[in-house]
Image: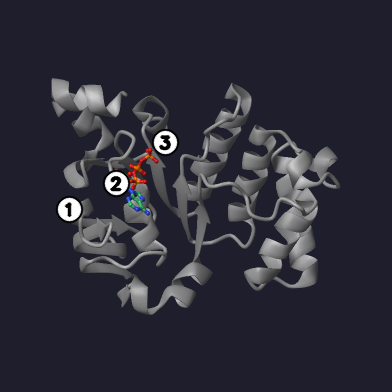
Amino acid sequence: MLKPVYELENVTLYYKKGKFKANDDISLTIYQGEIIGILGPNGAGKTTLIKQMIGQLAPTRGSVKFRGYEVSRHVKDVIQQIAYYSQETFALSFLKTKEALYFTGRLKGLSKKEAKQQTDAILQRLGMYEYRDKILSKLSGGQRRLISFGTTLIGQASVMILDEPTNELDPLKRKLVWDIIRELNQKGTTIILVTHNILEAEKVVHRVAVVDHGKLLALDHIENLKKRVDQRMRVEIYA
Ligand code: ATP
């Protein structure tokens, strides 16, 4: 029996004091252990949907539940259990790379020893160990993204929400990130991956939710979706 992690029911979200509908009646269940892609062109409403899944926004109508609990009423519990990678600039840019990882680990409740061990292991896995004493603001954009991705690995959350995790990365680092995502999923981690690049996403995702103009256009296994994709959607999802 598949266990739901997230249950979204009729999620509708308005911005601009009710003038702009960014999510329109979206219903979607995400199951434990799957990798689901949330796909759609720029401005489709993907990040808005994710912000409601992490409790940064509350739906105007409908409900977003995490393991049975309404997210907007249990934000602290939810964020303790998930790891979230966003496209927004890393806030801790005055820290050294190792400090950014270490402090994230401590915030997630790791002991000093665990936080240090995981920091070292993640820096090594990401090929960033030699940059451990470098201040984040002095790294390249791609290196900073990679460290930001690293912070989602510390603490080994059972659910990861990754908003375009390979943006700005070179091909080798992109492959590294996809490999890590696949490995984590094989160990049972549920992964929610936001992207507009189906060519990359199809290498890892099981199911895809296609969003456009705030609506859920399709929800299916990647293979089925590729078969039945119509010309209009093809343009949108391959954009
Ligand atoms: P991208 O792929 O470009 O990141 P997206 O699918 O994640 O796009 P969202 O960021 O969810 O899209 O934005 C959906 C729509 O809501 C867009 O038209 C955007 O301009 C609008 N929007 C996003 N944030 C706000 C905000 N804080 N206030 C008003 N409108 C917003």
| Image quarter of the N terminus | bottom left
Q: Position of residue 50 (x, y in %)?
A: 37, 55
Task: Specify whether 149 is left or right of 72.
Answer: right
The reply, left or right, for residue 128 in relation to residue 20 is: right
Above or below, 92 against 206 in this view is below
The dot on residue 24 is 1
Instruction: Please name which of the two marks, 3 or 2, marks the residue nearer to the observer.
Output: 2
Residue 118 visible (yes or no) = no
Amino acid identity at mark 1: Asp
Left-right relation of 51 to 176: left
Residue at (77% x, 54% y) in the render = 95
Q: Which residue is mark 2?
A: 45
Labelled pair 2, 1 in contact (Cβ < 8 Å): yes
Q: Is mark 2 within 8 Å of ligand 1?
A: yes
Q: Is residue 202 left or right of residue 64?
A: right
Q: Nearer the viewer, residue 7 or 214?
A: 214
Pick the front one: 202 or 210: 210
Query: How far is disc 3 from disc 2 in space, using C-alphas?
Result: 22 Å
SS class, disc 3: loop
Q: Is residue 154 above or below residue 150?
A: below
In the rendered image, which residue does mark 3 sit on? 204
Q: Amino acid at mark 2?
A: Gly
Q: Quadrant of the C terminus?
A: top left
Label 1, secondary structure: give it. Answer: strand
